[in-house]
Amino acid sequence: MAITALDPKTALVIIDLQNGIIALPTAHPVGEVVKHASSLADAFRRHDLPVVLVNVSAGAPGRTEQAPRVREFPAGGTDLVPELNQQPQDHTVTKRTWGAFTNTGLGEHLKKLGVTQVVVAGVATSSGVESTARQAHENGFNVTLAVDAMTDLNLDAHTNSVMRIFPRLGETGTTQEILGLLDSTRP
């Protein structure tokens, strides 16, 4: 794991830290994931960098061999966790597929802001986080993945994404490494 740089205009993209998702059983304690993601959001705001908060309201259509864990969310299930301390300047995206770039205008929004890099965190590592990272990479963004600010419903799937997939999409590191780089390169 090695983060070499954060571009001058880097955005934080937090995936699906919402009531209906964090209630599911996860491979790592979700409270720690939320704490790390919240620390990243606070730091990005402090440095006047864009924060994107993503929630999911539905799944992509089509048949799958494995049924989705959640077909519909109960009331409040799509609400972002309060620990993210959502601010008026944060950009909110509601997605209906795994990736946050599909049919949401996120790519256009980030490019309009001059963003060239994204730091991605959230749940679930092998679906929403990985799909968003793939889409960001395919759209020409530099990608950094905050590996301690994410988890999955399955430990093997999480490990596969972190160890095999993410190094091919960008750089990986811890929240502390990202915060250290932010604080050392920004006024």
Image (tube, grey):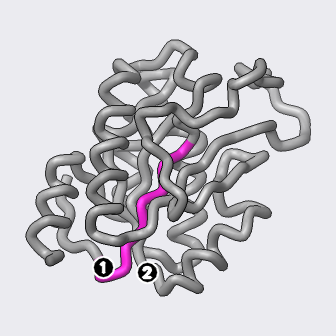
Pointer 1 residue: 7
Q: Which mark is residue 161?
A: none
**How far from the left and from the top, in percent, is residue 156?**
43, 25
CA separation, marks 2 and 1? Answer: 7 Å
**How far from the left and from the top, in percent, is residue 133?**
51, 58
Depth check: 93 or 162 in front? 93
Q: Residues within 10 Å of mark 1 (few under 14, many from 20)?
A: few
Res 62 → quadrant: top right
Q: Is residue 139 left or right of residue 187?
A: right
**How far from the left and from the top, in percent, is residue 76?**
70, 25
Q: Residue at x 32, y 49 (%)?
A: 146
Q: Are marks 2 and 1 in contact (CB under 8 Å)?
A: yes
Task: Identify residue type, mark 1.
Answer: Asp
Residue farthest toward the right in the current orientation of the protein: 62
Residue 66 visible, this angle: no
Q: Could you tell me which quadrant the C terminus lies in?
A: bottom left
Q: Which residues are magenta?
A: 7-15
Q: Is residue 15 left or right of residue 97?
A: left
Mark 2 falls on what kind of element?
loop
Pointer 2 residue: 116
Q: Is residue 50 magenta?
A: no
Q: Is residue 166 above or below residue 7?
A: above
Q: Residue at x 35, y 32 (%)?
A: 33
Q: Residues within 10 Å of mark 2 (few under 14, many from 20)?
A: some
Q: Is residue 18 above or below residue 86?
A: above
Q: Is residue 11 magenta?
A: yes
